[in-house]
Image: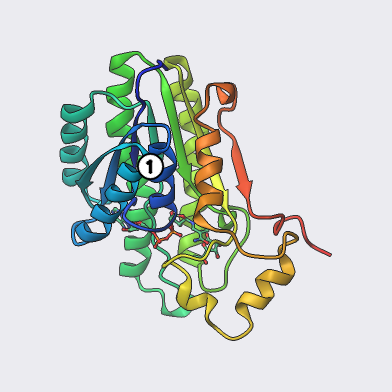
């Protein structure tokens, strides 16, 4: 890694944790590629404004991370704009809450395609360029506490998050010889668009507040900060790790 402005891609940066992460890197003056799915241009433009206000240099780039053709085009566009990345943050994800018996094969496949295939496609496309450049770098993927626990209405989702954590472990082995570390960040519960409806269900928010020792659900900046920490030079020996960022919810059994 060099002293010049870092080149960063955050997938799913139109909203939520991805937006906060893009802004966090913007505060360092980074060049930040803001990936968004076609149809979310306005949200991505708002993220770009926030990155600029923070001191960064935004580059919004559309692509459905589940689509190999769109991911390849994004990799080409970002490379033409920035050259190889220093930091890749795989954040894009969906969680369509559903009863187990209502999950049809389309919902199962789409959840896996966005959450898990997306991380595979994006990481392969961008680390190929990083390896060719020989500058090293960092890959951080947003997994979840749901990689370690189950969810009655997240059967399809939890399996994708366990897959992301596993993928980072294997890629930690593959990419370390090229100076690229791969880690997963596992958020607990953070109120964003992905779960706003679920958290509005009677008693749900109170249940979390009681279970989380710090007393409240997280905010996107909590996760952005943890992602950022893993990209610092001091974190260079952290590789293949899962960093749980949940206010202590997981350990609070009794
Ligand atoms: N909010 C939470 O409590 C938790 C969230 N996470 C994970 O954090 C990540 C971000 O989620 P949030 O910010 O919470 O939700 P969000 O709904 O606010 O953000 C999701 C982002 O992914 C993008 N996205 C969705 N489908 C996409 C696609 N096909 N291609 C490109 N981008 C796409 C959306 O445009 C949006 O910017 C997800 O991977 C989620 O699973 C993990 C644990 C807890
Ligand atoms: C979307 C959920 O509220 C959120 O996502 C996760 O991965 C956690 O398990 C939370 O439940």
- Residue at 42% of width from left, 79% of height from top? 102
Q: Residue at x 72, y 55 (%)?
A: 248
Instruction: Identify whether 226 is placed above or below 2.
Output: below
217 to the left or right of 61: right
Residue 105 picture location, percent across and down: 34, 68
Residue 101 position within the rendered picture, expressed as x and y whole percent measured from the top left: 46, 79
For the N terminus, give its image quadrant: top left
Q: Residue beneath label 1, please?
A: 54
Near-viewer residue (188 or 159): 188
Residue that extends furthest to the right in the rendered view of this protein: 254
Res. 65 in view: no
In this view, the residue farthest toward the bottom is 202
Give how far across and how far down residue 85 sits, in percent. 32, 27
Q: Quadrant of residue 134?
A: top left
* Depth check, front residue: 6 or 51: 51
Name the foreground residue: 69 vs 103: 69
Task: Count the labels in the image.
Answer: 1
Q: Position of residue 135 (x, y in %)?
A: 36, 15
Left or right, 14 with respect to 236, comes to left
Residue sitting at 21 percent across and 49 percent down? 63
Name above or below for residue 199 compared with residue 128.
below
Q: Is residue 153 left or right of residue 120?
A: right
Few, some or many residues within 10 Å of mark 1 (<14, 14–19, 20+): some
Above or below, 221 relative to 225: below
Q: Is residue 244 above or below residue 26?
A: below
Q: Quadrant of the C terminus?
A: bottom right
Residue depicted at 52% across the width and 73% down the height: 153
């Amino acid at each position: 890694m060099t002293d010049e402005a870092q080149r960063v891609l955050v997938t799913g940066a139109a909203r939520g944790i991805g937006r906060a992460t893009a802004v966090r890197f913007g505060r360092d003056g980074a060049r930040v590629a803001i990936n968004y799915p076609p149809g979310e241009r306005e949200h991505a433009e708002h993220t770009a404004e926030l990155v600029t206000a923070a001191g960064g240099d935004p580059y919004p780039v559309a692509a459905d991370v589940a689509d190999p053709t769109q991911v390849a085009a994004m990799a080409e566009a970002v490379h033409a704009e920035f050259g190889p990345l220093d930091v890749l943050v795989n954040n894009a994800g969906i969680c369509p809450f559903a009863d187990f018996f209502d999950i049809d094969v389309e919902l199962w496949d789409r959840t896996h395609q966005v959450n898990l295939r997306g991380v595979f496609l994006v990481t392969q496309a961008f680390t190929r360029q990083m390896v060719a450049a020989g500058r090293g770098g960092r890959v951080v993927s947003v997994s979840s506490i749901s990689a370690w626990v189950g969810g009655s209405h997240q059967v399809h989702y939890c399996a994708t998050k366990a897959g992301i954590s596993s993928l980072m472990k294997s890629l930690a082995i593959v990419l370390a010889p090229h100076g690229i570390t791969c880690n997963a960040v596992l958020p607990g519960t953070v109120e964003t668009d992905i779960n706003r409806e679920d958290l509005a269900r009677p008693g749900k928010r109170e249940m979390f507040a009681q279970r989380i020792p710090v007393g409240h659900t997280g905010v996107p900046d909590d996760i952005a900060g943890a992602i950022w920490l893993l990209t610092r030079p001091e974190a260079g020996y952290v590789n293949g790790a899962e960093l749980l960022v949940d206010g202590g919810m997981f350990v609070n059994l009794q």
